[in-house]
Image (cartoon, rainbow, N blue to C red):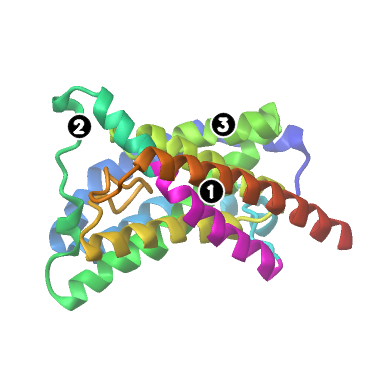
Amino acid sequence: MERPSALAREPAFSLLFIIAGLHLCFSPVLQQLQQGLGLILSFALFFVLPLFTLCALHRLPTQELLGLRRVESSLLLFAIAIALANFGVAGALQSLTEHLLPEHLISPFDYGALLAGTAFEQGAVILSIFVAAPVAEELLFRGYLQSIFRARGGALFAVLLCALLFSAIHFELSGSIARIELGLIFGLLALWSRSIWPAIVAHATNNGTAILLLYSGTGEQADGGALRAAEGWSSPLGAAAVGAVLTLGLLFLFRRRAALARAKE
């Protein structure tokens, strides 16, 4: 890995601006052709390709910089458990945000419509939400950007800033607080494990849970990890509180397990 002083000089906001611009300008065009394949191509062409191109041009140690190191399977299992425990917390945060926002600022987008269409179209959408989005977004935010911002201002600064930027790039107010909270969790997983894989697994688990809820008819939000006020919950706040306690406990255990794994290296 390059020295922190060298990493701090690498582009961060400029890269994010380019990626956001490409995503906003060209992703809708690709999605008009076919929703699922358009999303997959968007993540590949407008997230992953610019990132790896920059790393190649600047001769950066891609594997180390992006956290593409293997981790023990127990950390990945912890990541799954953390995402499941936290799902209700993210849902409560989104519901609260929607309650506080004026009606005209709440996204009118029907996420359930993403899973309409033929079996092939639905499969492509699921693949984009469950695989393409977690991989592309975590490589950018918890891989490259978190490494650069850590070199500039320290670990906690990097985790918080990347969580804020992760939420902002989705351009949707109703899920903004939930995505910040999710970004913090993904950032801590990557920080403590020194690998991007637990963050990718947690992100994929979060999105996959949302997809299952969409299919079961109990949720309306697919991406971003927030469950819109799930119908039939007798006490959503109570469920969120239990989820928060479980999430904090699992994060504590994850950090200890990651420290033990590093000590064995």
Q: Are marks 3 and 2 in contact (CB under 8 Å)?
A: no
Residue 57 at what x, y percent from top left?
Answer: 57, 50
In magenta stretch: residue 89: yes
Residue 8's image quarter?
Answer: top right
Residue name at image x 54 percent, y 30 percent: 161
Give the percent coordinates (x, y) of residue 13. 49, 31
* Residue type (three-letter) at the residue carrying disc 2: Ile
Q: Residues within 10 Å of mark 1 (few under 14, many from 20)?
A: some
- Place of residue 223 in the rendered image (x, y in percent of width and height, measured from the top left): 32, 51
Q: Count all numbered tags in the image, as a single digit.
A: 3
Q: CA distance from mark 2 to mark 1?
A: 36 Å
Magenta part of the protein: which range? Answer: 72-90
Q: Tag 1 or tag 2, which sits nearer the N-term? A: 1
Residue 116 in view here:
yes
Q: In the rendered image, which residue does mark 3 sit on?
A: 160
Based on the picture, tell me whether residue 231 belongs to the magenta stretch: no
> Rounded to the nearest whole Å, what is the CA distance between mark 3 and mark 1?
24 Å
Cβ atoms under marks 3 and 1 closer than 8 Å? no
Q: Label 2, on which residue?
A: 106
Dot 1 amino acid type: Leu
SS state under label 2: loop
